[in-house]
Image: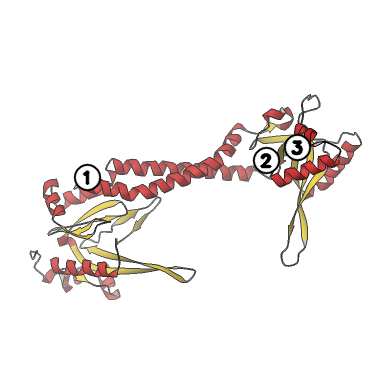
Amino acid sequence: MFEELKKRSIKKRLFPSILLLVIGAVILGFSFPSVMEVLKGRVAFETLEPDEIKEKMLVDVSLDTNFGCYIEEYEENTKTHYTRTTDLYYVIWTGDDDAVDYRYMGIKVPVSEEDKMEEMAEATYNNRRSDPVRYSGEIQKMPDEDYEYLKEYFLGSGLTEEEFKEYTLPYFINTEAMQEDTVVVTCVFAVCALVLVVIGIWMIISAVKGGRLKTFKKELANAGFGEAEADLEYQGAQIIMKADDFRIGRRLTFFIIGSKPHVLLNDEIVWAYQKTITHRTNGIKTGTTYNVVLHTIDKKKYESQHVFVKKQSEIAVAGEERALEALAYIGQTMPWVLLGYDNDLSKLYNKDCQSFLNIQYTKVDHNQLI
């Protein structure tokens, strides 16, 4: 019995565990390079050799030279068709004043920086040095289309294609990326992804080690059943729903909520009914689920352990017909159980349980077994 329940518990935990692992791994994969650069801190761009410049690097740049704008980025109002320039891309070069090996690449700045950058470009054209402007940002790879714009810019300046390939890098410094708030968000995403991975691994390990059976064993002990006696009851029980191991025996009822097995003394069950849930998306019906709800004499709640919260749940069954069959079987084997839902019954059960029990539970001989 325990091994069978353990296998079912592992099977039920496998999909959500793998889902968490995959989601966490994907997020980690995307955020890991950025997180590593955050941990390294920003590097002075002028100190980098061309072959040291890589995507995702965080840099501080003291810019006193640029060679003009090669892209204007804009946004358009779809209703008025009014366009507004948002960002500008300028040509800069790598290294400091003493650099022997250098390359040309880009820098992206908001349009609010246009006056500074145009003044700097004019000074560069006239072989004058501007007051340095300091920026921070992330080195990013140019999209192919942007790299073609850069190519057109240099070919228009007289360079050959061979010279363009030799003297340029397909990167630009995005001064609007990886600001302090973005860094925090990136780290938070990475931590959340790591938590998902840890939870996924823990869920699998817990199920494999039989951790999901702890509650079941405790409930079995409270019911006064040993393993051998319970196993006989389990093997001889009527299977109502195989997937959730919902089965009803002469003295015990077995079921699984989420991935956690439970066992109830039939004598403790006082109320059972069908619960139908209609699922809708944007007002359109997408499906219906059917559950069998069991209430006990001590108002126990059987909970499904989700990733972050415990959610009260019911025993899921495959369709209304199966739910009605389950209730009919409960009525035959446990005649003291009140069947069917009613709002007044719900209020009575929660406010005056003894009066609820007097309706049927106390009037039936509980030794009536099949």
Residue assigned mark 3: 105
Residue 86 image offset from top left, x and y in percent: 75, 53
Residue 28's spot in the image, x, y percent? 51, 41
Q: Is residue 140 left or right of residue 185?
A: right
Q: Which residue is mark 1?
A: 3
Q: Amino acid at mark 3?
A: Met
Quadrant of the rendered structure where residue 245 is?
bottom left
309 vs 98, nearest the viewer: 98
Q: Residues within 10 Å of mark 3 (few under 14, many from 20)?
A: many
Q: Amino acid at mark 1?
A: Glu
Residue 351 position within the rendered picture, expressed as x and y whole percent measured from the top left: 27, 69
Q: Separation of disc 2 and disc 1 at Cα?
A: 54 Å
Choose between 351 and 319: the one closer to the eye: 319
Under circle 1, the secondary element is helix
Q: Is residue 269 left or right of residue 43?
A: left
Q: Is residue 83 left or right of residue 370?
A: right
Question: In this view of the protein, which residue sits in the foreground, 134 or 57?
Answer: 57
| First in sequence: mark 2 vs mark 3 | 3
Residue at 71% x, 64% y is 78
Q: Are marks 2 and 1 in contact (CB under 8 Å)?
A: no
Residues marked 1 and 3 touching at CB (< 8 Å): no
Q: Is residue 297 left or right of residue 308?
A: left
SS under mark 3: strand
- In front here: 341 or 246? 246
Q: What is the three-letter code of the residue carrying label 2?
A: Lys
